[in-house]
Amino acid sequence: MRTPEVKERADAARNRNAVLAAAARLFSEKGVDGVSMDAVAAAAGVGKGTLFRRFTDRAGLAMALLDERERELQEKILRGPAPLGPDAEPRARLRAFAAAYLDYVRAHADLVRLSETGTPGARYRIGAYAFWHLHVKLLLAHREDAEADAHTLLAALAAEHVIAMTDRIGADRLAASLAGMIDGLYGASRSTS
Amino acid sequence: MRTPEVKERADAARNRNAVLAAAARLFSEKGVDGVSMDAVAAAAGVGKGTLFRRFTDRAGLAMALLDERERELQEKILRGPAPLGPDAEPRARLRAFAAAYLDYVRAHADLVRLSETGTPGARYRIGAYAFWHLHVKLLLAHREDAEADAHTLLAALAAEHVIAMTDRIGADRLAASLAGMIDGLYGASRSTS
DNA sequence: GGCATAAGCGGACTGTAGTCCACTACTGCG
DNA sequence: CGCAGTAGTGGACTACAGTCCGCTTATGCC
């Protein structure tokens, strides 16, 4: 988990791990949509109250499960080799990010969708989104409003969209379209710098 | 409703109108999220089964309510004056579409979100999406993969995204970012905002 | 007008997310 | 070591979306 603000009691930690393990197993066995929160609680041997206290809701549980994978990608971006890492040129790096993030979403499609679809606006409030957004924004520093453009680009990487597009045009065409869009952002800069 | 494939029985039509009227009233009184399907059924004086038989689910009810507004915009696009209508240049027309659609979403934010958020992928299956997509695709005919690019552009107009962005950067910056993105797709040096 | 038939109806029922709160048992302190 | 206090627990409970199926009634035909 991301930040235990205060030290966590031993029994609580044990239960949290039990829940994560049970959830991971059930989700992979029956699919994300085939598992109820009751089932997770029962399989983990805890009560429902405990489950919700720790993870807030279904989306929160999904986020916790994604946490590790997500951090791998963040690590590669911050310290890994080019083109993802800091040694690449911005445009190439942004293209690489889009491709890598697309892979990440596709690899965990249902979980990511679940994590983005809980309460309205959930996607935009989670720490991970802030990270991706900051990264893209910095790579778009030449734009007049890099912050807004970063959001716009990330919209096309929302799980809901990625899943639907994978279905109807395939991941390759989606990736190519994103790459083209990125090129457009470098080629048609409205900034004077 | 869009197309009664077969003639509809008189009592059915009466009930459908009662439901739409009741739903419109309740939604505007208490907000979309403050109204349950039971409440709509009760207010319309029909049973729950009837409500679901006609509208399938919550999202379907939202779509039915949006139907008329949506068609107004479609009409302006198909036959209205420039820049939205067919007499404008593609780029200007696409910019105008993005702005107009953005307004449409913002004007009915909760309903549109509801209509897009029902079952996973709902947004992409409804007829309206097909219409917008076709329109954008035709305006992007010069692109290598106009179909994919149209999807990518529309991703930034999903209700979820529009609502979140309105909150955090404001509609104007979102609109400007979309315009810039469109300019990028035309490969051009800038045109006036 | 009377009848057959299927479209339409409605409300009881099911499954699930999320809440609540009385109870339990760690943990730190004296 | 024993106690106080609070973090943690669990399962009964609520609210709601969506399903099911036996009953009702509009409609078209004779």
Image (cartoon, coloured by chain):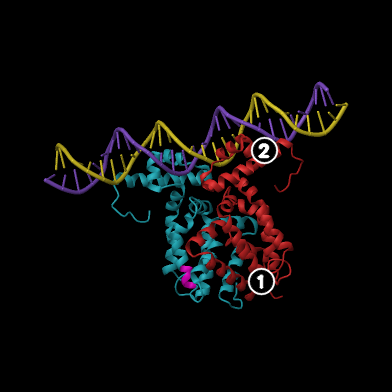
Chain colours: A red, B cyan, C yellow, D purple
- Which residue corresponds to the image point at 67% horizontal and 40% vertical from the top-left? A16
Give the dominant element type of the magenta stretch: helix, strand or loop. helix
Return the mark for residue A15: 2
Q: Kindly state the secondary structure of the residue where label 1 is placed.
A: helix
User: Mark 2 or mark 1, which is nearer the start of the sequence?
Assistant: 2
The Cα atoms of the two marked residues, 1 and 2, are separated by 44 Å
Identity of the amino acid at label 1?
Ala
Image quadrant in which you'd find residue A9: top right
Label 2 crowding class (10 Å Cα cut-off): few <14, some 14-19, many 20+?
some
User: Does residue B107 appear left or right of residue A104 in this picture?
Assistant: left
Q: Are marks 1 and 2 in contact (CB under 8 Å)?
A: no
Task: Find the magenta span and give its range.
Answer: B135-139
Give the label on residue A92, or none.
1
- The C terminus of chain B is located in which quarter? bottom right
Subunit ID for the residue under disc 1 = A
Disc 1 residue crowd, few under 14, some 14–19, many 20+, Cα 10 Å: some
**Taking D9 as reference, is B175 above or below it?**
below
Task: Report the chain holding disc 2.
Answer: A
Q: Is residue A99 above or below residue C7?
A: below
Is residue A164 rendered to the left or right of residue A1? left
The residue mark sitting in front, 1 or 2, is: 2
Share a chain, discs 1 and 2?
yes
Relative image position of residue A149 (x, y in whole percent): 63, 65
Q: Quadrant of residue A45?
A: top right
Secondary structure type for disc 2: helix
Image spot of residue A64 (x, y percent): 65, 48
Observer-nearest residue: A184 or B77? A184
